[in-house]
Image (cartoon, grey):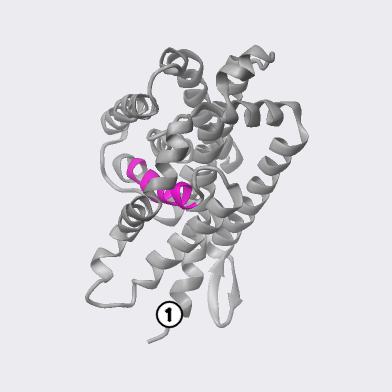
Amino acid sequence: MTFLPFLISGLGIGAVYALSGVGLVILFRATGVLNFAFGAFGAIGAHCAWQLLEWKMPLSVAILAAVVVSTAISFLYGRIFAPMLSHRDTVVRAVGTLAPALVLIALMGIIWGELPRRLQFPTDQMFVSLFGVRLTYTRIIAILLAVVMVGAITLLLNRTRLGLDMRALANDRDLSAILGVRILYTETAAWVITGIFSGLAGLLLADLVRLQGTFLTLLVIPAIAAAILGQLRSLWQTAVAGLLIGIAEAALTPVGWISPYRAAAPFIIALVAVTILGSTAKAVLKDR
């Protein structure tokens, strides 16, 4: 039994988990909100892309539409509803994101149903051989995109005024307001950024796994596991954790007795992460 093909294939899904986890951490650091609707935002964007492709629209238009839709929904929630909960407990703010998630699941069910679909990109048919294993261009793009996005966000946080304001909010929201940080503007920017991340992640997951509203919404769990392993602070630690979760899930595929349950691996990892790092997570949440 060789695990190498599965480990390499796990890099692609792991990169998407990494991308999703970083998107969650960015929002949490700036607003204190753990966004359970992240997967739903990406799912509806991916459905829109699929629909446009069915209507024979160019792939570039479909991809752009997916990111715009997920970003627009994230922006609207962050601008209209999130401020209403800004002074509530962290748990309340997190639970508040379940409402748009449930609404979007229902909307996707009404419009597209629950029949699983797949997005098909031209890069699915192109590949390179790595240690004798085929690695599609789509998976390579996912890995490169995760690295580029994490690097870009790191630069934004460290080199721009917006990044400075986000880091200030992460430390003390009330003090930041006194010092002149534009709270609503900064938090809205964080929602826009996480919307872009969710749109890209939704597209990749719809291609690498399957396109189904409920399924993609629940894939926020591996992202949360990665974010917790990154202690809800470190972008690069979260990205590495996401990659490892994807690889761990893929590594279970050739194990006959456990293979049918491998999809549960990210959920188990999330549970273990919460158990082991529970005290750290509690301290971070309490600070918010």
Q: Look at the numbered disc 1 and give the secondary structure of its residue.
A: loop
Q: Is residue 138 left or right of residue 97?
A: right
User: In the image, which residues are magenta?
Assistant: 217-229
Residue extending farthest left: 257
Question: Please, is residue 1 above or below residue 88 in the view?
Answer: below
Q: Is residue 226 magenta?
A: yes
- Foreground of the two, 200 or 59: 200
x and y percent of residue 109 in the render? 27, 33
- Foreground of the two, 93 or 20: 93
Which quarter shows the N terminus?
A: bottom left
Residue extending farthest right: 159
Which residue is at a point 61% across and 40% down the rendered structure image?
60
Which residue is at a point 52% across and 26% down the rendered structure image?
31
- Foreground of the two, 234 or 267: 234
x and y percent of residue 111 in the render? 31, 29
Q: Is residue 97 visible?
A: yes
Q: Is residue 142 left or right of residue 286?
A: right
- Foreground of the two, 234 or 6: 234
**Residue 39's quadrant in the figure?**
top left
x and y percent of residue 126 in the render? 58, 65
Q: Is residue 42 visible?
A: no
Q: Is residue 51 left or right of residue 189?
A: left
| Kind of residue indicated by mark 1 | Phe
Query: In the rendered image, which residue does mark 1 sit on?
Result: 3
Looking at the rendered structure, the number of numbered marks drawn on it comes to: 1
Majority secondary structure in the magenta region: helix
Which residue is at a point 29% across and 29% down the rendered structure image?
102
